[in-house]
Amino acid sequence: MFRIREFEEQVFELYKIGLMPGLAHLYIGEEAVATGACAALEQKDYIASTHRGHGHLIARGADTNRMMAEILGKKDGYNKGKAGSMHIVTMEKGILGANGVVGGGIPIATGAAYGSKVKGSKEVTVCFLGDSASNEGNFHESLNMASAWDLPIVYIIENNLYGISVALRRVTKVKDLADRAHGYGIKGIVVDGNNVLEVYKTVKEAVEFARQGNGPTLIECKTYRHKGHHVGDPGIEYRTREEEAEWKEKCPLAAFKKVLTENGVSEDEIKGMEQEIIKEIAEAVEFAKKSPYPDPSEAFQDIFS
Amino acid sequence: MREITYAQAVAEAIDEEMARDSNVIFLGEDVGVIGGNFKATVGLRAKYGDWRVKDSPISESGIAGIGVGAAITGMRPIVEIMFSDFISLAMDQIANQAAKIRYMSGGQVKVPLTIRTTIGGGRSSAAQHSQSLQAWVAHIPGLKVVLPSTAAELKGLLKTAIRDDNPVIFMEHKMEYNKKYPVPEGEYTIPFGKANVVREGDRLTIVATSSMVMKSLEAANELAKENIFIEVIDVRTLVPFDKQTIIDSVKKTGRLLVVDEGHLSFGVGAEIGMKVIEEVFYDLDYPIMRLGTADVVIPFSPALEFPIIPDAKKIYQKAKEMTK
Amino acid sequence: MAEFILMPKLGFNMETGLITSWNKKEGDIVQKGDVIFEIETDKTTMEIESTVPGTLRKILAEEGETVPVVLPIAIIGEVNENIDSMVKEALSQLGKQEDSVSESLEVSNESGEASQEKLDTDIAEAPLSIDSSIRLKLSPRAYKYVQENKLDISSLEIEGTGFEGGVTAKDIENYVKNNKHKLTPLAEKIAAKNKLDGNSISGTGIGGKVTKADVERALGTTEVKESSPAAPVSPAATVSSTSPAVVANADGRKVLKTISYTGMRKVIGERLSQSKFTAPHLYFTTSVDVSKLMDLRKQVNEAQEQKISVNDFIIGAVIKALQKYPELNSSLQGDQILQYEDVNVGVAVGLETGLIVPVIKQAQSKKLSQISKESQVLIDKARSGKLLPDEYQGGTFTISNLGMFGIENFTAIINPPEAGILSISAVKKTPIVIQEDGEDKVLIRPLMNITLSVDHRIIDGLVATRFINEVKSLIESPFSIMI
């Protein structure tokens, strides 16, 4: 969780000094969802990410050097500078890809699960999606098929309450998006998305359920993004300072730190780990900065295999 | 040579490829139990089972996405979208996902996905079931686009499509399914990106796609009786595109007519004309001309539909006008 | 009020004319009837007279330019008259760029407002002028052909078979094939006059067509003009090439000279082949005693200043016979035989370059003296290559006279689509046997063979013999010709 937090803070710094082309959607505040969910997966499993995907990748064990290089559009990035923040793909970690289209990754994740089902290979796919993606047609089409055919997949809604600037409550009647599971004849569960252990426990159960061939589960993680929609959005027009403060109080990192100390991990040990991560991310930034830009001719490569 | 229908050629190609590679799966609306809306996949479900030949719900985007997801995780899926008109429902998965994943991943991922769909008017299917939308997909980098003409062409090209490691939009002409064509026995494939000169001539080059190849041949045969010899080229694949065969032909004939059933404006005819003009400009004795479906919504009544779609007679007239 | 001088249309098929020379220059005073320029068509050369008096203000098409008929080529007007708008209109019609638009605008418009209005009009009309300027719509392939073969297309008179009448590569190829080494009529005339082998001169026209300028250059009579970049010709090389080398043919026969079967030669050949192969010819020869005609001619010519030739009498006899037997004054047109009211008699004239048949129109209503006068003018014009198309078209019957060359007998081929032709051979003193007082006597008489060729499809022997006998009796009783 701290690695995600630190990574995102540094991305924001790079954006502010103009080193990062384009935009990035920061995961700060939501770290417990990716961390808890990915901890429940095996090496062979798949995840499908979203436009707010850095956290999922880091939680899945992606190399922060290569991620940072990709975000800066460098040659040593995971995708040679062709993906950027929103589209990082790394199959070696079972990451089917972040996705620039809201809900675009849901059918793809479902297809991966379909393949696993046909092969009988017992992989489970975790499909991350935002609250707003659950209003896309792809959500319906995919959950319908996954449930009809008992596909090995777990859909995790990261409900951070806003689709860019629009509060979910203004565009959606149901209070809990997990309730939509009933429409597909599958289990829908609401969890505290800022409680990493609760997320882990719930996802673990759903993954095992899927792995046994019982079909999908829909898990809704209630959480909050501390920053705006993306690095260029201060996020102040549509949210109140009170609401922000309230959620920052519920910071997943602080909550978990408390659990650790309560369970006998010393402040120093935690500090030590944090220092190591700070160093690692600083190195990632250096790595990314030093990495050369791709040659313009590379624009013409990798269209077809 | 034995004769089989265009529909049977589809079934044979898929059957052979499914037998050859257990990663080939096939998914689409009505493709299984009844063997497809156009009866082009009869018998496959019985042979390969419900998981490899899947009747899907009516969810074009969903099934296209399943194709993409399965493809990038090691399967070799074939997805059927019953009418090309419906690819609009699956366009995000086709144009934003399938076409781009390989590139966005910096070449890490391959997407061996075949999307079969149908094009063409002529059966009073009206506005939403008659379009030939090859220009839509050919416009997107990252998609290969195949327009088979005869059953023999279809079989060889479909097998190549299935074996290709890239997303291929395979567009079958719905008026051809019941027509019989000579098809070679046994195993064969037809490579992409190699146009086929189906008739040689010296007065005019007709470049055609899909069933317009047969209609152009009909027109060319008529003109041959008048000692006007037309070269007819079957494009086969819009992407990849074989420019050279067309350039060589136009250098010989000095005249080019492109016939494609898509709507005329911003379409295949315009693109093929522009693709070659740089290299044949000083060989042209006539402006490059094109025939296509008129820029109107495709109407229902045969009295309205046939006049707006190119046919052998219209090709004959145009070719005659260009060679007089 | 200034007026345009237009490229005249001198025949139904004339589409363009080549200006071969200007006899006046800009600023010259021109009287009505003054020859102001000469043009050349595929058949003839003509002097064009001014139809109005005034000052030649502007020449719009230079020597060597080919201009479509009825387009303006010059402006004649008052010395101080403003002709800017006329120049503008003419250049637009001719598809030429105006070289001094702004200047003429300043002259012709007093206020800026008007000037602006004029500019607007220009812009609106610009596409039209471009369109009308495409005299030769070359297809790109044709353009490449022209470039690769270094052709000068400025005088190209060619009907395009391509898109909207555009000229295709094939069109030019065919044109070149048919016009290789051809001399323009004017060039031919000058070459012949100077005993220069026209075929040995390098041509700068389309497909190497030899123009007047080429011939003059070869003769060294004119200053060498700036040669066309497409076909540079060195005068020295041109002169040295006037003695053709003797080369051996593939079959060992030595070729002295190769002459293209093209142009006028080909037209003649094709027309005669067509006649001979489609109209079954039937011939009738008879011998005519011209002693009375000779006597009459002598008397007539003594009595009047204007001399009438034997040929004129024969023409007169044929005119009369044709009026009596209109079957011969006809032609087969599709599935109809047309008998003509007018008798338009053609008189074949042999030239060094071929054959041409000037026509005396409506001869049935003309007196012999008139016919004589007219035929002399026409024959002179034919010999000097100045026949107007109208003067060699529309004949209904032809007479071919080789008498002056001493030919005793010959049969001519019908000039299509006419029904017959009369061949006239030389008058020769011949011993003949006549019966006088029941006794055979040998007399010497000037006899002349005439042979009638008819198209047997429409003329049978009976009518033909009646006709030729009518001609014979008219000549032998020549007074009736004069009545």
Image (cartoon, rainbow, N blue to C red):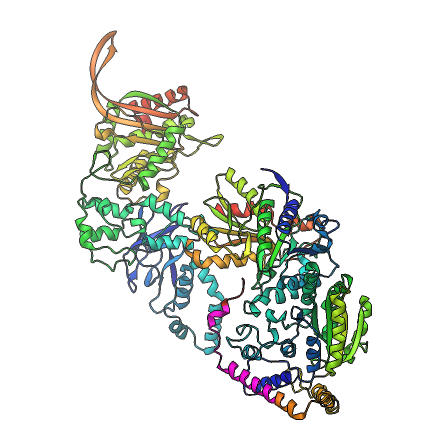
Picture residue at 44% right of the left edge, 62% below the top: C130
Look at the image and give the residue range highlighted in magenta: A274-299
As drawn, A210 above or below C173 = below
Residue C192 lies in quadrant: top left
User: Quick check: A38 left or right of A202?
Assistant: left
Q: Quadrant of the C terminus of chain A?
A: bottom right
Residue C385 x, y percent position in the rendering? 28, 44
Pick the front one: C207 or A118: A118
Q: Position of residue C186 (x, y in %)?
A: 27, 48
Task: Examine the rendering and report whether any part of residue C448 can be seen.
Answer: yes
At 82% across and 69% down in the image, what residue appears?
A182
Q: How many marks?
A: 0
User: What percent of the width, then of the height, locates residue A270?
Assistant: 65, 89
Q: Is residue C240 above or below residue A48?
A: above
Where residue B179 sits: x, y (%)?
A: 64, 42
Q: On the rendered image, what quadrant is the N terminus of chain A found in?
A: bottom right
Asked whether residue C358 appears in the rendered view, the answer is no
Q: Is C465 contained in the magenta span? A: no
Quick check: C94 left or right of B155? Answer: left
Considering every residue shown, the one lying at the far front of the view is: A264
Q: B96 or C56, which is in the foreground? A: B96
**Magenta-colored stretch includes residue A289:** yes
Q: Nearer the viewer, residue A295 or A169?
A: A295
As displayed, is residue C451 above or below residue C256? above
Characterize the magenta stretch by its predominant secondary structure.
helix
